[in-house]
Image: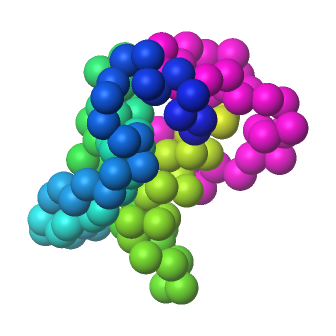
Amino acid sequence: MSEEDWWDHYTDDPFLKVGNYVPDSFGNSIIVTLDLITWAYIDWYSETYQSDPSLYFQKLHMLCPQDISFSDWIEDSVRNTYLREERDGRPRPPWCSVAQPDEYQDVEIPLDN
């Protein structure tokens, strides 16, 4: 996700790290730290598509490789979701810039929302 249009809507740094509790694969609360822009995209996506982010986090936790932190895994997964949505021509939040085809042409999606 690109932050160029972020500043037209928000004053906070889009890359400010923010910690929140999310459920792990067993439903236990754990803290993950993500960029503010990533949390904003998760919120926007959940509202736009009436999806439950708790289920998304639980599924991602089950699939998280051992050699990457869960926070990094979520960041990568959310970015891939954004790129998949761009590739498929679906709506994006007004504060997300348009992704270029070379960014999403080979995107891999570890989990379909």
Residue 32 position within the rendered picture, expressed as x and y whole percent measured from the top left: 27, 64
Counting from the top left corner in percent of width and height, residue 68 is at: 51, 78
Point out the stretch of residues depicted in magenta: 85-113
Q: In the picture shown, does residue 51 fall above or below 21?
A: above
Q: Residue at x 53, y 22 (%)?
A: 5
- Is 62 in the magenta? no
Q: Quadrant of residue 23?
A: bottom left
Color encoding of the figure:
rainbow
Q: Position of residue 3 (x, y in %)?
A: 53, 34
Number of labelled discs?
A: 0
Residue 22 shows in the view? no
Vertical position of residue 71 compared to residue 57: above or below: below
Q: From the viewer's side, name the closer residue of 24 and 17.
A: 17
The answer to which quarter of the image holds residue 81 is top right
56 over 30 or under it: above or below: above
Q: Residue at x 61, y 23 (%)?
A: 97
The verdict on residue 101 being magenta is yes
Where does residue 47 sit, x and y in percent of width and height? 29, 21
- Whether residue 94 is visible: yes
Height in image: 78 above or below 60? Answer: above
Task: Tell me if 28 is positioned left or right of 102 in this view.
Answer: left
Examine the image and state in which quarter residue 12 appears.
top left
Locate the N terminus and report the quarter of the image it occupies: top right
Q: Residue at x 49, y 85 (%)?
A: 66
- Residue drawn at point x = 74 percent, y = 47 percent: 107
Which SS does the magenta portion mostly show? loop
